[in-house]
Image (cartoon, grey):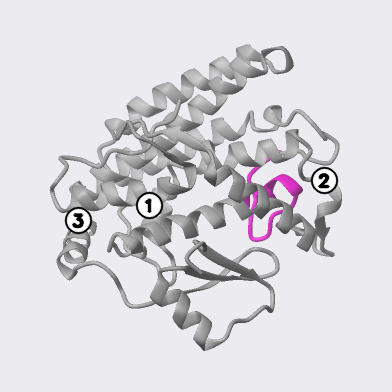
Amino acid sequence: MHNLEQIVTFGHAGTSPALMGKCAKSGISLVFMSRNGNFLARVEGEIRGNVLLRREQYRIADNPEKSLAIAKNCICAKIFNSRWVLERMTRDHAPRIDCDKFAQKSQFLKDAVNKAESAPDMDTLRGIEGEAATVYFSVFDDMILQQKDDFYFHTRNRRPPLDRVNALLSFSYSLMTNMCASGLDAVGLDPYVGFMHTDKPGRKSLALDIVEEFRSVFCDRFVLTLINKRLIQPEHFDIREDGAVYLSEQGRRIFIENWQKRKYEELRHPYLNEKMQWGMLPYVQSLLLARMIREDLDCYPPFLWK
């Protein structure tokens, strides 16, 4: 089991109490999801980390000014990374897209980063983030270069996803959220107490804060790669009577196999200036956040990609 990092089950597959205990003791995340890829539960062992770290996390969460400072960094990183996804698309596929339109959207996102930095309160920050997301997704369909008849994006929809692209996005966001929750738990933070996402029973609010940095740069680019390289096909989806679209069993297998390959690809961390695998980023960002909460860092350095 020393080679295992995480076990994710779908549908009605179960595990014995002995296996659950072994996974918890070995630090292996055991996640149960529905056949449609919706999160159900995660097996956790004894809570790690010291109580002083978590108590300081709770104090920051209850302090609007300190919470806003961390939330700003997360959202600025989200918008910054979204912009550079558009810039990378312009660089790599200029003949196949409307470069003027992409340049206009990129400039809007650049301005939105500056606005987010100076947001006076959380509601204003949420408004800036929502507007930036709308602008970013307005050209998402243009980044789909293959299989256009079967893979198209008009608007973001979920619970349930109503087209193949949204089904892929929702599945990737769910997996990344679990990775961030595992990273936060590993460094001793409480994944359920966030700074921008408010407390809600059963919601991993802090994991949702951290995952904002990875939505466009990891999840969205991964989904576009699956489609544009024809790794995923229309027949890998199930369409329900109510219009809901989900990955089939074969589709999930293809998705996860390629997801794992993507996690093992390397990059240089922009803040630490060290080479590491993409799959390590949620843990590394959790560690940096813990250092900031312990006051080893002046502020939280979010993940910025180019």
Q: Are marks 3 and 2 in contact (CB under 8 Å)?
A: no
The disc at residue 60 is 3
Q: Residues within 10 Å of mark 3 (few under 14, many from 20)?
A: some
Q: Position of residue 90 (x, y in %)?
A: 61, 17
Seen in the picture, residue 229 relative to 95 is either above or below; the reply is below
Residue type pointed to by label 1: Tyr
Which of 5/122 is in front?
Answer: 5
Amino acid, disc 2:
Gln
How far apart marks 2 and 1 lie (CA) works out to 32 Å
- Residue 283 is tagged as 1
Q: Is residue 267 visible?
A: yes
Residue 290 is left or right of residue 107, and the answer is: left
Q: Quick check: 287 above or below 116?
A: below
Question: What residue do we see at 39% from left, 49% from top?
Answer: 210
Compared with 115, 285 (above or below) is below
**Alpha carbons under labels 3 and 1: distance apart:** 20 Å
Say few, some or many: other residues with alpha carbon within 10 Å of mark 2 (under 14 / 14 to 19 / 20 or more). some
Of circles 3 and 1, which is in front? 1
Tell me the magenta residue range. 154-170
